[in-house]
Image: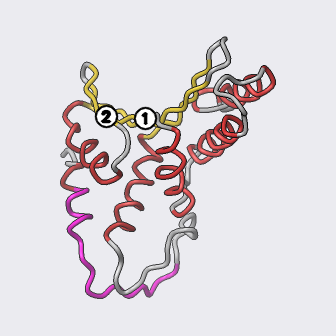
Amino acid sequence: SKINLLDQIESILNFTVASIKYTGPRAPGIANLAKPTNIQNKKDIFLQWFVGFIDAEGHFIISTNSKGYVTFRFIIRLHIDDLDVLQKINNILKIGVVRVEGNSSVFVVTDLNSLREVLLPIFDNYPLFTTKALDLSDFKRAIEIKLNSPTPKLNITDLTNISTIKSGMNLGRT
């Protein structure tokens, strides 16, 4: 049966823990997760869920053009049936936009300040575990190049460096 993602988010946000006592060993690969405590913050629980969700469904995209301009996008694309999930994420994070494109619902963040100040710090506290972590690292490196540029239009060296980073991301990763 299909898992209702909106119900999953709602249960996370409504989840209150009276007493969680961790007694067993950590599973391999989850050593960087926050240690369990007696009372966990709903925000922390949501962000842990969100990062796992991004490992599967999120995309970090860099676009360049021949005139020396670069744009950065973070995208989650789901079936239109899951529009409510993206709206919930949008309402919680208070960044980006949600729109419908054909059979898909899309959450997109393009504002550089929203990426730097809201989205990227989430992954500093709740790391990705798949190869998506490598894409995130490349995305951050490219943003730093852009931020260190004195003008909105990049010089040829910076544009070439970002293009090289971009070519190794997502499907270009070998």
Residue 20 falls within the magenta-colored stretch: yes
Type of the residue with mark 2: Leu
Asked if the residue under mark 1 is in contact with the one under mark 2, i.e. CB atoms within 8 Å, the reply is: no
Viewer-proximal residue among 26 and 88: 88
Q: Main secondary structure of the magenta part?
A: loop
| Residue that appears at 57% across and 23% down | 63
According to the image, label 1 marks what residue? 75
Q: Name the side, left or right, on which 56 lies relative to 78.
A: right
Quarter holding the C terminus? top right
Compared with 19, 88 (above or below) is above
Q: What residue is pinned by disc 2?
A: 78
Quarter holding residue 8: bottom left
Q: Position of residue 6 (x, y in %)?
A: 21, 50
Report the residue at 63% width, 32% height from top.
Answer: 169
- The span shown in magenta is 8-25
Q: Which mark is residue 145?
A: none
- Name the secondary structure under disc 1: strand
